[in-house]
Image: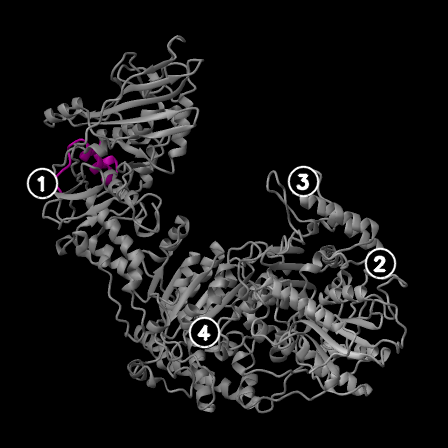
Amino acid sequence: MDDRDLDSAALWAAVDSAAAAQASRRDHDRTHLRNLEDDEHRDRGGEVVQPARPFKVPRLLTTPPPPSPRPLQLQMAPRPHSSPNITLTPDATRLVVVDTPPPTPTACFAAHDLFPAISVANFRKYQEAALSILDKSDYTSISGNPYIKKSGWRKISCFFNISFEIKDRSIEFDENRNVNRAEFLVRASMQGGRFSDGWGSCDRREKKFNKPNHDVPSTAETRAKNKACQGGSRSRSRSMAWLRAASGLARHALRRRVPAASRFFHSARPAWRSSAPVPRAVPLSRLTDSFLDGTSSVYLEELQRAWEADPSSVDESWDNFFRNFLGQAAPSSAGLSGQTIQESMQLLLLVRAYQVNGHMKAKLDPLRLDDRAVPDDLDLSLYGFTEADLDREFFLGVWRMAGFLSDNRPVLTLREILSKLEQAYCGPIGYEYMHIPDRDKCNWLRDKIETAKLKEYNKDRRLVMLDRLIWSTQFENFLATKWATAKRFGLEGGETLIPGMKEMFDRAADLGVENIVIGMPHRGRLNVLGNVVRKPLSQIFSEFTGGTRPVEGEDGLYTGTGDVKYHLGTSYDRPTRGGKRIHLSLVANPSHLEAVDPVVIGKTRAKQFYSNDLDRTKNMGILIHGDGSFAGQGVVYETLHLSALPNYTTGGTIHIVVNNQVAFTTDPRAGRSSQYCTDVAKALNAPIFHVNGDDLEAVVRVCELAAEWRQTFHSDVVVDLICYRRFGHNEIDEPSFTQPKMYQVIKNHPSSLKLYEQKLLGTGEVSKEDVQKIHEKVNRILNEEFAKSKDYVPNKRDWLSAYWTGFKSPEQISRVRNTGVNPGVLKRVGQAITTLPEDFKPHRAVKKIFEQRAAMIESGEGIDWAVAEALAFATLIVEGNHVRLSGQDVERGTFSHRHAVLHDQENGRKHCPLDHVVMNQNEELFTVSNSSLSEFAVLGFEMGYSMENPNSLVLWEAQFGDFSNGAQVMFDQFLSSGEAKWLRQTGLVVLLPHGYDGQGPEHSSARLERFLQMSDDNPFVIPEMEPTLRKQIQECNWQVVNVTTPANYFHVLRRQIHREFRKPLIVMAPKNLLRHKDCKSNLSEFDDVEGHPGFDKQGTRFKRLIKDRNDHKQVEEGIKRLVLCSGKVYYELDEERKKTERSDVAICRVEQLCPFPYDLIQRELKRYPNAEIVWCQEEPMNMGAYSYISPRLYASMKTLGRGSFDDIKYVGRAPSAATATGFLSVHAQEQTELVKKALQAEPIKFP
């Protein structure tokens, strides 16, 4: 039965539930079970036949109607006083409930009851059994009844008043006279009772077994017999083997051998007519035990024998069962009436309605302003029940279901059923889980929700919860008293969040969680910081009074710009109620709602990698959301979408929505289109628990359930804490301007603490004195911490975690390290990354690429961009560093250049050469992964990942640099300013393909100007540039480079790891340089050998500026023009210089744009004292690097006395709104003109 809707199969399952009277066996009945191998089956003639193997009783379902082009519809008439009946219309497209007289308690069955079908779960077993029959060579016997070797109808068995006959219709044999395929008619009848027909088939070649179909029109012979049926006498049978009839018909009726000359035999199939016998309802007495759970028919036969000897020797339910089927049922006693098929179906529909829509009736709104209409399908009368039925008893069991529908639950009255449904689904918790298409998950939740008794907490637990709620409430009251006009975004109205989170953490720790990473908005953040993560209260209070900045210049006390108190984060090792310790990290975040979500997930994934948490049970992420932002911010869905991706999953995140029922001033009806703000989570099949925020114990219950779900199923779960906001968006805001009705109710509404205190006082579990003592203790501690805050002095800054020990802050000097690699190591890793397994069959073009790469390594010449990148990754891996590269299409590369993951062209097997650099390499030590089509969430994920451990090179690559602005919030709020605001370093590398190739305005520019504009270096102050004293990069917020050689790219990547601090690196990655004939490097430029081309005074390292390719002297007075440029335009300028033979022009490449290389620029200005100074770029004037370069170039010139600002000449495209033209011809013309202008003979006129 599908858990998402109640389809026709579910309806017929309900019919089966009543017809078969499902209920569990009692323990004492199991004593009747005997070993099948010792049991003998006797036929009518007394012949003993030993079964070939034990045979398990199938689970029986009434066969559903045949497929129809029209959907199955259910039509119900009002419930009559007598039991109605359910039947198929003649075209078999609808179920119709009709009025019939009350049936007598006899064993007369409707046609559908005579032919139970095989269940889906057991179908494979019977398929194998039927196919095995095809391999036999002669007739066999069934239950002691041999086949009758004659044409026409042949009796195959007579089971408990029901006779089964079979008639071959079409049997096909192979050359060995084995049956290949058989079609057969089956007919069942009761002694003096009704007849019904069916047919089935079996095919050995296709390994296919078709279940017998019994929803077919009757033959004329059958209709005649049914017409003559007058009931007849019903004798007792010693056999209950009819229960296995569904499989026996196919298993035992298909084997025969015929002479080889007659290989094929065919006979015509009778034409079916459109009419069908009308089924009659089956009354059943109350049953508390089910024959469906028996392991074989032998068990039932033994029960019958015991019952025949002494009816009192079996359970009452079995006594009722045998009496019913033998026509001996006694009239029903008061309060115990027959349960009919349609009543079972209706009850199932009713239970399903509560499971699906019970949350719509739940008491979720603490303000009681919710005017939602209760769905009609929760109305009892819809299902034909009246007040008179409330005290009738019913059985609800359904096969493979849990909770109320479990087949081992006791019989209940309808009143009890309704009470339990209301208690489970319509109380202070509303559950949404029926959208989950996984039966096991739904059953797990049913067992947790549909309990016989509501979970109750003992006195000790309630006192702990009360203490935690008092702390949460008193903290907010204390802040409101001391700083009445300060913005603090308090938690008033949602105070139960704090005890709920604490109970969640305690439960998670009991289930194996050791680290929790938390992300949340500003509402309630101070309360979480103080009461959950345990940030010193004196520090929080000090921040309210303005805080105390550490003494300037003192080592290790860099504070940056700081941030408001409700944006800051912290970490703490928290003891739990169970005696364990759990590490909590609250990630700092901006006011940009939900932007922190992917950062938390990435940080959690990194923790799992570094702690070798392969099962993802020790490290968990928790995200707290607002109702408006959870529904409105797209990054929420982008983050949810990462939850099950192999290289992004964290084994599930717990989402807690603090639902204020208003977003700033916007009502929900204007803020979302869905019923709930959490509906977006249904796309991920996450369960959603809505809970009334005023009910503390309900909040605790769902928080614990969320922790258990996450640890059990390793997937996301949502807790929707429906509360309110007592003081508006912030404490100085007036909410009555826009929500007057709501705030009139809030004004008179008691707090959740007041409500819980009244509850405990009412039960007598606590006294007023006990409550008062807790209040006094909390107030005393708060006042003590407030007194300490006046003299609070910040301690030395703690840089993240133990992984960051020894790393330098911006005011500390860090020496520059060489990044060259030993030539032997380069050779070995080069061979490793260019060698493919012998049995691997790559695409022929890829195979050729790797052959060329191997030749590059062997010769040491012509190293291209992709090989340089792979060498950088491989050498870092050899040194023990973790390398992770992700983004859209990064495995192959947008421009088909990387080929980090290869695919076998024959079997699809994947191979990553960089996974085999060292022996026994951890499979995640190098990770390259195509991401979902998201910039915001994926960049945020990698940002969080990079913050956990500095000994990792984490890279994100945009498909095109133009698309990176989809993640602009991450660049603005985290990457460029995170260290200054929150003292958190990251070495994340961002690769942005950039370059003007005529591909139009959306595939040309990575918006270099934006990254340079966000750089925080002063353009008019040249910093200390002496190598031993230089802190320029440390003091800058990030680095921006536009690299032009593979070797320099190799060194800039390695430089990220080989330094004592971390800074983000923005790389304007090339496009056409990936295969440019001149964009090559020699392997000697990668090594650390003195005298090789890459080795300079300090060694082999990244070159911030590459001087002119001609070997100019220290002073060249004959050079008339110095062209400074960056990126691929250099190669076009150099080509044009060769054509025009302009030996009086020098071209220098500024590889590192930010921070600006003042010392190297001044070196080149001194080298060419008479040169005209030109800045050349491809981008329009209002874009690119010109606006950033010009004031810094002027500062360098001014120091040397080289002229004014006007002496800097600009060559490039004119200002433009769009980044580039969409016309290829115009692009080519613009590119040619700017290159020619930069090298023209006459002086350049600008401005």
- Tag 3 residue: 840
Closer to the eye: label 1 or 4: 1
Evaluate if marks 3 and 1 touch, with contact meaning CB atoms under 8 Å apart.
no
* Badge 1 or badge 4: first in the primary sequence: 1
The tag earlier along the polypeptide, 3 or 1, is 1
Indicate the position of residue 970 as horizontal and vertical percent values.
57, 71
Of helix, strand and loop, which one carries label 1? Answer: loop
- The amino acid beneath tag 1 is Pro
Q: Is residue 315 magenta?
A: yes
**CA gap, disc 3 and disc 1:** 74 Å
Q: Earlier in the sequence, mark 2 or mark 1?
A: 1
Residue nearest the viewer, comparing 850 with 1114? 1114
Amino acid on which disc 4 is placed: Ile
Does the image show residue 586?
Answer: no
Rounded to the nearest angstrom, the CA distance separating label 1 from label 4 is: 61 Å
Q: Which residues are magenta?
A: 310-332
Mark 2 → mark 1, Cα distance in angstroms: 99 Å
Left or right position of 1166 against 841: right
Q: Which mark is residue 1084?
A: 2
